[in-house]
Amino acid sequence: MNARAHELKVREVISETADAVSLIFDIPTDLTGRFTYAPGQYLTLRVPSERTGSVARCYSLSSSPDGDERPTVTVKRTPGGYGSNWLCDNVSAGDVLTVLEPAGNFTPRSWNRDLLLCAAGSGITPIMSILKSALRLGRGDIAVLYANRDRPSIIFATQLQELVRRYPRRLTVVHWLESERGLPTARGIAGLARPYRRNDVYLCGPAGFASTVKQGLGQLRVSERSIHEEKYRSLTDNPFEHATIAHPDPVGPVPVASAESAIVTVDIDGETHTLPWPRTKKLLDVLLDHGIDAPYVCRESACATCICSVKQGRTRMLMNESLIEEELAQGLTLACQTLPESDSLHISFDQ
Ligand SMILES: Cc1cc2nc3c(=O)[nH]c(=O)nc-3n(C[C@H](O)[C@H](O)[C@H](O)COP(=O)(O)OP(=O)(O)OC[C@H]3O[C@@H](n4cnc5c(N)ncnc54)[C@H](O)[C@@H]3O)c2cc1C
Protein backbone atom coordinates (compact mmCIF):
# COMPACT_ATOMS: atom_id res chain seq x y z
CA MET A 1 0.00 0.00 0.00
CA ASN A 2 1.21 3.48 -0.86
CA ALA A 3 2.73 5.07 2.26
CA ARG A 4 0.83 8.27 1.59
CA ALA A 5 -2.53 6.47 1.73
CA HIS A 6 -4.71 6.98 4.80
CA GLU A 7 -8.11 5.80 5.93
CA LEU A 8 -10.56 8.68 6.30
CA LYS A 9 -14.08 8.65 7.62
CA VAL A 10 -16.77 10.24 5.47
CA ARG A 11 -18.57 12.65 7.79
CA GLU A 12 -21.37 13.61 5.42
CA VAL A 13 -22.59 12.97 1.88
CA ILE A 14 -24.38 15.88 0.21
CA SER A 15 -26.47 15.34 -2.89
CA GLU A 16 -25.57 18.37 -5.04
CA THR A 17 -27.59 17.55 -8.17
CA ALA A 18 -29.29 14.44 -9.56
CA ASP A 19 -25.87 13.12 -10.63
CA ALA A 20 -23.30 14.68 -8.30
CA VAL A 21 -22.45 14.20 -4.62
CA SER A 22 -20.02 15.87 -2.26
CA LEU A 23 -18.11 13.77 0.25
CA ILE A 24 -16.99 15.62 3.38
CA PHE A 25 -14.10 13.97 5.24
CA ASP A 26 -13.22 13.95 8.91
CA ILE A 27 -9.47 14.37 9.38
CA PRO A 28 -8.09 12.84 12.58
CA THR A 29 -5.86 15.24 14.54
CA ASP A 30 -2.67 13.27 13.80
CA LEU A 31 -3.28 13.61 10.03
CA THR A 32 -4.12 17.33 9.97
CA GLY A 33 -0.66 18.23 8.62
CA ARG A 34 -0.82 15.54 5.92
CA PHE A 35 -4.19 16.78 4.70
CA THR A 36 -3.32 20.47 4.60
CA TYR A 37 -4.07 21.47 1.00
CA ALA A 38 -3.98 24.34 -1.42
CA PRO A 39 -7.08 25.51 -3.34
CA GLY A 40 -7.28 23.64 -6.65
CA GLN A 41 -5.60 20.45 -5.35
CA TYR A 42 -7.23 17.02 -5.43
CA LEU A 43 -7.48 13.79 -3.45
CA THR A 44 -7.08 10.32 -4.94
CA LEU A 45 -9.69 7.83 -3.71
CA ARG A 46 -9.44 4.07 -3.67
CA VAL A 47 -12.58 2.57 -5.17
CA PRO A 48 -12.99 -1.15 -4.41
CA SER A 49 -13.51 -3.45 -7.37
CA GLU A 50 -14.24 -7.15 -7.44
CA ARG A 51 -12.58 -7.25 -10.86
CA THR A 52 -9.24 -5.60 -10.12
CA GLY A 53 -9.09 -5.26 -6.33
CA SER A 54 -9.43 -1.53 -6.65
CA VAL A 55 -9.18 1.43 -9.00
CA ALA A 56 -7.76 4.85 -8.15
CA ARG A 57 -9.69 7.99 -9.08
CA CYS A 58 -8.74 11.64 -8.50
CA TYR A 59 -11.33 14.15 -7.27
CA SER A 60 -10.62 17.84 -6.86
CA LEU A 61 -11.32 19.45 -3.54
CA SER A 62 -14.35 21.71 -3.85
CA SER A 63 -13.81 23.06 -0.33
CA SER A 64 -11.46 25.94 0.37
CA PRO A 65 -8.77 25.60 3.04
CA ASP A 66 -9.45 29.27 3.77
CA GLY A 67 -12.85 29.03 5.40
CA ASP A 68 -14.27 25.53 4.95
CA GLU A 69 -13.75 23.43 8.02
CA ARG A 70 -13.28 20.03 6.35
CA PRO A 71 -11.88 18.82 3.03
CA THR A 72 -14.65 17.97 0.58
CA VAL A 73 -14.56 16.41 -2.87
CA THR A 74 -17.39 16.50 -5.39
CA VAL A 75 -17.99 13.54 -7.67
CA LYS A 76 -20.18 13.68 -10.77
CA ARG A 77 -21.37 10.49 -12.42
CA THR A 78 -19.61 9.72 -15.70
CA PRO A 79 -22.14 7.84 -17.85
CA GLY A 80 -21.00 4.19 -17.90
CA GLY A 81 -18.03 5.05 -15.65
CA TYR A 82 -17.03 2.64 -12.89
CA GLY A 83 -15.47 4.73 -10.12
CA SER A 84 -17.74 7.77 -10.13
CA ASN A 85 -20.91 5.66 -10.13
CA TRP A 86 -19.57 3.42 -7.38
CA LEU A 87 -18.86 6.45 -5.20
CA CYS A 88 -22.24 8.07 -5.92
CA ASP A 89 -24.15 4.82 -5.25
CA ASN A 90 -22.25 3.31 -2.32
CA VAL A 91 -20.76 5.90 0.01
CA SER A 92 -22.70 6.94 3.12
CA ALA A 93 -21.84 9.00 6.19
CA GLY A 94 -19.65 6.95 8.54
CA ASP A 95 -17.98 4.92 5.79
CA VAL A 96 -14.20 4.80 5.66
CA LEU A 97 -12.36 5.39 2.36
CA THR A 98 -8.67 5.01 1.56
CA VAL A 99 -7.36 8.32 0.30
CA LEU A 100 -3.98 9.65 -0.86
CA GLU A 101 -2.69 12.94 0.51
CA PRO A 102 -3.61 16.11 -1.46
CA ALA A 103 -1.69 16.67 -4.69
CA GLY A 104 -1.65 18.86 -7.79
CA ASN A 105 -0.48 22.29 -8.82
CA PHE A 106 -3.65 23.92 -10.22
CA THR A 107 -3.35 26.80 -7.76
CA PRO A 108 -2.94 30.53 -8.42
CA ARG A 109 0.46 31.88 -7.40
CA SER A 110 -0.98 35.18 -6.21
CA TRP A 111 -4.40 35.93 -4.76
CA ASN A 112 -4.45 39.57 -5.74
CA ARG A 113 -4.65 39.13 -9.49
CA ASP A 114 -7.86 39.42 -11.50
CA LEU A 115 -9.07 35.95 -12.46
CA LEU A 116 -11.20 34.45 -15.21
CA LEU A 117 -12.35 31.03 -13.99
CA CYS A 118 -13.85 28.82 -16.71
CA ALA A 119 -15.61 25.55 -15.87
CA ALA A 120 -18.03 23.07 -17.36
CA GLY A 121 -19.92 20.41 -15.41
CA SER A 122 -17.79 18.79 -12.69
CA GLY A 123 -14.94 21.12 -13.73
CA ILE A 124 -16.44 23.59 -11.25
CA THR A 125 -14.93 21.60 -8.37
CA PRO A 126 -11.36 23.01 -8.24
CA ILE A 127 -12.68 26.34 -9.57
CA MET A 128 -15.00 26.61 -6.56
CA SER A 129 -12.11 26.04 -4.19
CA ILE A 130 -9.96 28.65 -5.96
CA LEU A 131 -12.88 31.10 -6.09
CA LYS A 132 -13.64 30.89 -2.38
CA SER A 133 -9.96 31.36 -1.44
CA ALA A 134 -9.46 34.22 -3.90
CA LEU A 135 -12.51 36.05 -2.53
CA ARG A 136 -11.41 35.56 1.05
CA LEU A 137 -7.67 36.18 0.66
CA GLY A 138 -7.32 38.47 -2.34
CA ARG A 139 -8.37 41.84 -3.67
CA GLY A 140 -8.74 41.02 -7.39
CA ASP A 141 -11.90 40.95 -9.49
CA ILE A 142 -13.13 37.52 -10.52
CA ALA A 143 -15.33 36.35 -13.38
CA VAL A 144 -16.67 32.79 -13.51
CA LEU A 145 -17.80 31.41 -16.85
CA TYR A 146 -19.67 28.19 -16.16
CA ALA A 147 -21.22 25.87 -18.76
CA ASN A 148 -23.84 23.20 -18.03
CA ARG A 149 -26.43 21.13 -19.79
CA ASP A 150 -29.40 22.82 -18.11
CA ARG A 151 -30.36 24.64 -14.92
CA PRO A 152 -30.93 21.53 -12.70
CA SER A 153 -27.45 20.20 -13.58
CA ILE A 154 -25.60 23.26 -12.21
CA ILE A 155 -23.46 22.09 -9.28
CA PHE A 156 -23.11 24.76 -6.54
CA ALA A 157 -25.76 27.04 -8.14
CA THR A 158 -26.94 28.32 -4.75
CA GLN A 159 -23.44 28.75 -3.32
CA LEU A 160 -22.42 30.79 -6.37
CA GLN A 161 -25.50 33.01 -6.02
CA GLU A 162 -24.67 33.56 -2.37
CA LEU A 163 -21.05 34.51 -3.20
CA VAL A 164 -22.26 37.03 -5.81
CA ARG A 165 -24.55 38.52 -3.18
CA ARG A 166 -21.65 38.78 -0.70
CA TYR A 167 -19.07 40.11 -3.17
CA PRO A 168 -21.16 42.08 -5.73
CA ARG A 169 -18.31 44.36 -6.74
CA ARG A 170 -15.66 41.67 -7.17
CA LEU A 171 -17.50 38.64 -8.52
CA THR A 172 -19.42 38.09 -11.77
CA VAL A 173 -20.84 34.67 -12.65
CA VAL A 174 -21.90 34.02 -16.25
CA HIS A 175 -23.77 30.79 -16.96
CA TRP A 176 -23.83 29.11 -20.36
CA LEU A 177 -26.71 26.63 -20.56
CA GLU A 178 -26.77 24.19 -23.46
CA SER A 179 -30.56 23.93 -23.08
CA GLU A 180 -30.79 27.62 -24.00
CA ARG A 181 -27.77 28.35 -26.23
CA GLY A 182 -26.55 24.98 -27.54
CA LEU A 183 -22.97 23.79 -27.00
CA PRO A 184 -20.44 26.54 -26.19
CA THR A 185 -18.80 28.07 -29.26
CA ALA A 186 -15.45 29.84 -29.54
CA ARG A 187 -17.18 32.99 -30.75
CA GLY A 188 -19.71 32.92 -27.91
CA ILE A 189 -16.96 32.37 -25.33
CA ALA A 190 -14.90 35.20 -26.83
CA GLY A 191 -17.92 37.51 -26.55
CA LEU A 192 -18.48 36.69 -22.90
CA ALA A 193 -14.80 36.70 -21.94
CA ARG A 194 -13.84 39.96 -23.70
CA PRO A 195 -14.15 42.18 -20.58
CA TYR A 196 -11.89 39.76 -18.67
CA ARG A 197 -9.26 39.06 -21.35
CA ARG A 198 -6.42 40.50 -19.25
CA ASN A 199 -7.22 38.26 -16.25
CA ASP A 200 -5.28 35.10 -15.38
CA VAL A 201 -7.31 32.16 -16.66
CA TYR A 202 -8.00 28.91 -14.76
CA LEU A 203 -9.85 26.36 -16.85
CA CYS A 204 -11.35 22.96 -16.02
CA GLY A 205 -13.86 20.93 -17.98
CA PRO A 206 -14.23 18.21 -20.61
CA ALA A 207 -11.69 18.29 -23.48
CA GLY A 208 -14.19 19.70 -26.00
CA PHE A 209 -15.11 22.58 -23.69
CA ALA A 210 -11.46 23.32 -22.84
CA SER A 211 -10.49 23.48 -26.49
CA THR A 212 -13.45 25.76 -27.31
CA VAL A 213 -12.50 28.10 -24.46
CA LYS A 214 -8.88 28.19 -25.62
CA GLN A 215 -9.98 28.97 -29.19
CA GLY A 216 -12.31 31.71 -27.92
CA LEU A 217 -9.57 33.22 -25.78
CA GLY A 218 -7.18 32.90 -28.73
CA GLN A 219 -9.56 35.14 -30.70
CA LEU A 220 -9.07 37.72 -27.94
CA ARG A 221 -5.27 37.27 -28.22
CA VAL A 222 -5.03 35.86 -24.70
CA SER A 223 -1.61 34.25 -24.46
CA GLU A 224 -1.56 30.48 -23.85
CA ARG A 225 0.86 31.21 -21.01
CA SER A 226 -1.82 32.90 -18.93
CA ILE A 227 -4.18 29.91 -19.29
CA HIS A 228 -3.82 27.29 -16.54
CA GLU A 229 -5.73 24.09 -17.18
CA GLU A 230 -6.68 21.10 -15.03
CA LYS A 231 -7.32 18.03 -17.17
CA TYR A 232 -9.60 15.32 -15.83
CA ARG A 233 -9.08 11.71 -16.67
CA SER A 234 -9.05 8.33 -15.01
CA LEU A 235 -5.77 6.87 -13.81
CA THR A 236 -4.60 3.73 -15.55
CA ASP A 237 -1.93 3.09 -12.91
CA ASN A 238 -3.04 2.17 -9.40
CA PRO A 239 -0.97 3.86 -6.67
CA PHE A 240 -2.89 1.90 -4.01
CA GLU A 241 -1.62 -1.45 -5.20
CA HIS A 242 2.12 -0.59 -5.25
CA ALA A 243 4.33 -1.27 -2.30
CA THR A 244 6.79 1.59 -1.90
CA ILE A 245 9.32 -0.23 0.22
CA ALA A 246 11.58 -2.21 -2.07
CA HIS A 247 15.35 -2.33 -1.46
CA PRO A 248 16.47 0.10 1.23
CA ASP A 249 19.49 2.26 0.44
CA PRO A 250 22.61 0.13 0.89
CA VAL A 251 25.22 1.80 3.06
CA GLY A 252 28.45 1.60 1.09
CA PRO A 253 30.97 3.58 -0.93
CA VAL A 254 29.69 6.74 -2.60
CA PRO A 255 28.70 5.75 -6.16
CA VAL A 256 30.54 7.25 -9.16
CA ALA A 257 29.20 8.18 -12.60
CA SER A 258 29.70 5.71 -15.46
CA ALA A 259 28.51 5.22 -19.04
CA GLU A 260 25.42 3.47 -17.67
CA SER A 261 24.61 5.66 -14.67
CA ALA A 262 24.75 9.26 -13.52
CA ILE A 263 24.95 10.12 -9.82
CA VAL A 264 22.12 11.96 -8.15
CA THR A 265 21.78 13.53 -4.74
CA VAL A 266 18.15 13.77 -3.72
CA ASP A 267 16.70 15.85 -0.88
CA ILE A 268 13.38 14.43 0.23
CA ASP A 269 11.42 14.65 3.50
CA GLY A 270 14.41 16.29 5.21
CA GLU A 271 16.81 13.46 4.25
CA THR A 272 19.54 13.35 1.61
CA HIS A 273 20.31 10.27 -0.51
CA THR A 274 23.09 9.81 -3.06
CA LEU A 275 22.35 7.14 -5.65
CA PRO A 276 23.39 5.86 -9.05
CA TRP A 277 20.81 6.99 -11.62
CA PRO A 278 20.75 4.61 -14.63
CA ARG A 279 20.60 6.83 -17.72
CA THR A 280 17.53 5.13 -19.16
CA LYS A 281 15.58 4.93 -15.89
CA LYS A 282 13.09 7.54 -14.73
CA LEU A 283 13.91 9.25 -11.45
CA LEU A 284 10.72 8.16 -9.68
CA ASP A 285 11.44 4.50 -10.50
CA VAL A 286 15.01 4.85 -9.19
CA LEU A 287 13.74 6.30 -5.91
CA LEU A 288 11.02 3.69 -5.43
CA ASP A 289 13.53 0.92 -6.22
CA HIS A 290 15.67 2.23 -3.36
CA GLY A 291 12.73 2.20 -0.95
CA ILE A 292 12.49 6.00 -0.92
CA ASP A 293 8.93 7.18 -0.34
CA ALA A 294 8.70 9.63 -3.23
CA PRO A 295 5.25 11.15 -3.87
CA TYR A 296 3.37 10.05 -6.98
CA VAL A 297 -0.09 9.25 -8.27
CA CYS A 298 -0.46 8.85 -12.02
CA ARG A 299 3.12 8.16 -13.28
CA GLU A 300 2.00 9.63 -16.63
CA SER A 301 3.02 13.30 -16.09
CA ALA A 302 -0.59 14.42 -15.69
CA CYS A 303 -1.00 14.92 -11.95
CA ALA A 304 2.26 16.72 -11.01
CA THR A 305 2.36 14.95 -7.64
CA CYS A 306 6.02 13.98 -8.22
CA ILE A 307 7.09 17.56 -8.95
CA CYS A 308 10.64 18.33 -7.83
CA SER A 309 13.33 20.84 -8.52
CA VAL A 310 16.61 20.36 -10.39
CA LYS A 311 19.21 22.21 -8.31
CA GLN A 312 22.24 21.03 -10.29
CA GLY A 313 22.78 19.21 -13.58
CA ARG A 314 20.73 18.79 -16.74
CA THR A 315 17.71 16.52 -17.10
CA ARG A 316 15.07 15.85 -19.72
CA MET A 317 11.44 14.82 -19.51
CA LEU A 318 9.96 12.13 -21.75
CA MET A 319 6.46 13.56 -21.40
CA ASN A 320 5.00 16.65 -19.75
CA GLU A 321 1.30 17.32 -19.41
CA SER A 322 1.47 19.48 -16.30
CA LEU A 323 4.29 21.98 -16.11
CA ILE A 324 4.04 25.30 -17.90
CA GLU A 325 7.04 27.14 -19.41
CA GLU A 326 7.46 29.37 -16.38
CA GLU A 327 7.78 26.34 -14.10
CA LEU A 328 10.22 24.62 -16.44
CA ALA A 329 12.31 27.81 -16.47
CA GLN A 330 12.41 27.66 -12.67
CA GLY A 331 13.99 24.20 -12.92
CA LEU A 332 10.91 22.19 -11.94
CA THR A 333 10.51 18.70 -13.34
CA LEU A 334 8.31 15.60 -12.93
CA ALA A 335 10.20 12.70 -11.39
CA CYS A 336 8.01 10.12 -13.16
CA GLN A 337 9.28 11.31 -16.57
CA THR A 338 12.79 12.59 -15.83
CA LEU A 339 16.01 11.12 -17.18
CA PRO A 340 19.54 12.39 -16.41
CA GLU A 341 21.62 14.22 -19.02
CA SER A 342 24.59 15.26 -16.85
CA ASP A 343 26.90 12.97 -14.85
CA SER A 344 26.19 14.59 -11.52
CA LEU A 345 22.83 15.96 -10.41
CA HIS A 346 21.11 17.38 -7.37
CA ILE A 347 17.34 17.16 -7.09
CA SER A 348 15.13 18.41 -4.29
CA PHE A 349 11.57 17.45 -3.40
CA ASP A 350 11.70 19.70 -0.35
CA GLN A 351 10.61 23.35 -0.67
C1 LIG B 1 -6.67 15.86 -11.26
C2 LIG B 1 -8.06 15.31 -11.49
C3 LIG B 1 -9.14 15.86 -10.80
C4 LIG B 1 -10.43 15.37 -11.02
N1 LIG B 1 -11.47 15.93 -10.32
C5 LIG B 1 -12.73 15.48 -10.52
C6 LIG B 1 -13.82 16.06 -9.78
O1 LIG B 1 -13.64 16.97 -8.98
N2 LIG B 1 -15.06 15.56 -9.99
C7 LIG B 1 -15.30 14.55 -10.89
O2 LIG B 1 -16.46 14.14 -11.01
N3 LIG B 1 -14.28 14.00 -11.60
C8 LIG B 1 -13.00 14.42 -11.41
N4 LIG B 1 -11.96 13.84 -12.11
C9 LIG B 1 -12.24 12.71 -13.01
C10 LIG B 1 -12.27 11.40 -12.19
O3 LIG B 1 -10.98 11.11 -11.68
C11 LIG B 1 -12.67 10.20 -13.08
O4 LIG B 1 -11.88 10.19 -14.24
C12 LIG B 1 -14.14 10.24 -13.44
O5 LIG B 1 -14.94 10.23 -12.26
C13 LIG B 1 -14.51 9.06 -14.33
O6 LIG B 1 -14.17 7.88 -13.68
P1 LIG B 1 -15.06 6.57 -13.83
O7 LIG B 1 -14.32 5.47 -13.19
O8 LIG B 1 -16.45 6.83 -13.35
O9 LIG B 1 -15.20 6.41 -15.38
P2 LIG B 1 -14.23 5.66 -16.37
O10 LIG B 1 -12.81 5.88 -16.02
O11 LIG B 1 -14.68 6.03 -17.74
O12 LIG B 1 -14.63 4.17 -16.06
C14 LIG B 1 -14.39 3.21 -16.97
C15 LIG B 1 -13.08 2.52 -16.63
O13 LIG B 1 -13.28 1.72 -15.47
C16 LIG B 1 -12.89 0.39 -15.78
N5 LIG B 1 -13.83 -0.50 -15.08
C17 LIG B 1 -15.12 -0.73 -15.38
N6 LIG B 1 -15.67 -1.58 -14.50
C18 LIG B 1 -14.68 -1.91 -13.62
C19 LIG B 1 -14.60 -2.75 -12.47
N7 LIG B 1 -15.65 -3.46 -12.01
N8 LIG B 1 -13.41 -2.83 -11.80
C20 LIG B 1 -12.34 -2.12 -12.24
N9 LIG B 1 -12.35 -1.34 -13.34
C21 LIG B 1 -13.51 -1.22 -14.00
C22 LIG B 1 -13.02 0.24 -17.27
O14 LIG B 1 -12.11 -0.76 -17.74
C23 LIG B 1 -12.62 1.63 -17.74
O15 LIG B 1 -11.22 1.74 -17.87
C24 LIG B 1 -10.65 14.31 -11.92
C25 LIG B 1 -9.55 13.75 -12.59
C26 LIG B 1 -8.28 14.25 -12.39
C27 LIG B 1 -7.10 13.63 -13.11
Image: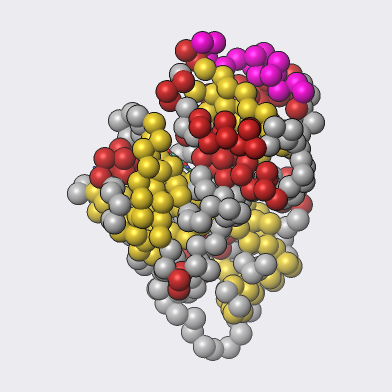
Left or right of 211 on screen, residue 69 = left
Horizontal and vertical percent position of residue 5 = 40, 63
Judged left or right of residue 244, residue 88 is left
Residue closer to the observer: 259 or 77: 77
Residue farthest to the front, as pictured: 165
Question: Which quadrant of the render holds ligand 1?
Answer: top left
User: Is 244 contained in the magenta span?
Assistant: no
**x and y percent of residue 270 in the render?**
61, 78
Q: Is residue 154 visible?
A: yes
Residue displayed at 64% across by 48% down: 133
Measured as percent of width and height from the top left, residue 238 is found at 37, 53
Residue 298 picture location, percent across and down: 47, 51
Residue at the (39%, 31%) spot, across then down = 17
Left or right of residue 288, residue 118 in this image: right
Q: How has the structure been colored for display?
A: secondary structure
Q: Quadrant of the N terminus?
A: bottom left
The quadrant where residue 176 appears? top right
Location of residue 202 (image quadrant): top right
Quarter of the image for residue 333 reads bottom right
Magenta part of the protein: which range? 180-195
User: What secondary structure prevails in the magenta region?
Assistant: helix
In the displayed structure, 144 sits above or below 335; it is above
Quadrant containing the C terminus in the rendered view = bottom right
Task: Tell me if residue 18 comes above or below residue 150 in the rendering.
Answer: below
Answer yes or no: is residue 338 visible.
no
| View extreme (left): residue | 50
Nearer the observer, 210 or 133? 133
At x 43% / y 63%, what residue is drawn? 27
Report if residue 191 lies within the magenta region.
yes
